[in-house]
Amino acid sequence: MQTKKLGNSNLKITPVGFGAWAAGGPGGEFSWGPQDDADSIAAIHRALELGVNWIDTAAAYGMGHSEEVVAQALKQWRGARPYVFTKCVLRWDANGKISQNHSAESIQQECEDSLRRLETDVIDLYQIHWPPRDNGPQLEEAWQTMAALQKRGKVRWIGVSNFDPAQIRRAQAIAPVTSNQPPYSMIRRAIEAEVLPYCQQQGIGVISYAPMASGLLTGGMTHERAASLPADDFRSRNLEFREPKLSKNIELVERLKRVGARHGRGPGEVAIAWVLRLPAITGAIVGARNAKQVDGVMGAAQLKLSQDEIQEIEGAAAAVAR
């Protein structure tokens, strides 16, 4: 795959990276439900075989388990080591309840814990998972701590996730921001108005997450499957997987299928290619739960949609875009 420079870093990343959220398995407030570790490892290996050169995870995914699975996959991998990106500030209690902690002490401890679970000496990209809910001064404390970790060599580059331009500016006043990781898909387009233009203007890399809307745009989600999602799968509480939105989203997938059929591609690949069409997007995080799923989505990096196809998709997406 071709690569693209991530913000102000020296990291050159492929258009798609492997998202290891589901690899966390059950446990924690935002899990994807049961997941076999061997399937996760096979999925990571298949993505790397196809040329993907970065993995995105977070401490909160499966209460640290996703990071441990990534470490196991890389120990068994004999090829070039990919970049590993992870995140901080979401902590969990004994019951798996997630809360934010932007204090310097917490972030420093989280970094050490992630380094241990990932079995590495340095994290390639360390990201603040969410800004403070009250938008308060802990944002500055957190970013000062991230910059200190970078200076100490614990992390190579530092980024943010789910930040708006005003919050990024506050961080930039302390130390450069390498990247921002927002959600972006055909049904979540809010970042087009301000976030993408600002990041592009400032030379900040953008790594979009959920380009297939957490599996909704893959073609595998039906009314029946959505209704049977287990209680420990966060998607069972997501309004996009419920009526009246679900039917509109499934209709959008049918249109994606028609575009994809012309290229011999699935709807998920079309959804990812649509995200990657914008120059402001450096890369998209693509999750998969097994090697077969990887084969069905990672080819999006080579799929180039024509302007007519983009307009066709845009027309279909307009009815469901939020």
Image (cartoon, helix red, strand yellow):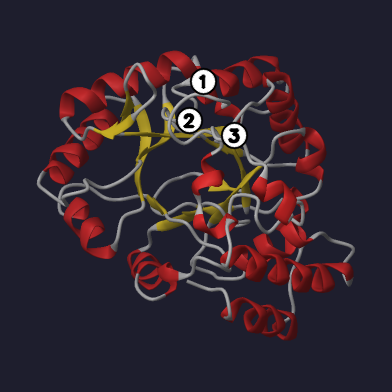
Mark 1 secondary-structure assignment: helix
Circle 2 packing at 10 Å, graded few (<14), some (14-19), many (20+), is many
Q: Residue at x 57, y 80 (%)?
A: 318
Is residue 261 shown to the viewer in this render?
Answer: yes
Taking the image as shown, residue 134 lies to the left or right of residue 55, namely: left
- The amino acid type, in three-letter code, at marker 2 is Tyr
Asked if labels 1 and 2 touch by Cβ distance under 8 angstroms, the answer is yes
Mark 2 secondary-structure assignment: loop
Residue 22: assigned label: 3
Is residue 221 shown to the viewer in this render?
Answer: no
| Position above or below: 111 against 301 | above
Residue 83: assigned label: none
Residue with the mark numbered 1 = 65
Q: Where residue 297 sits: x, y (%)?
A: 75, 50
Q: CA distance from mark 3 to mark 1?
A: 10 Å
- The amino acid type, in three-letter code, at marker 3 is Ala
Front residue (pair 97, 145)? 97
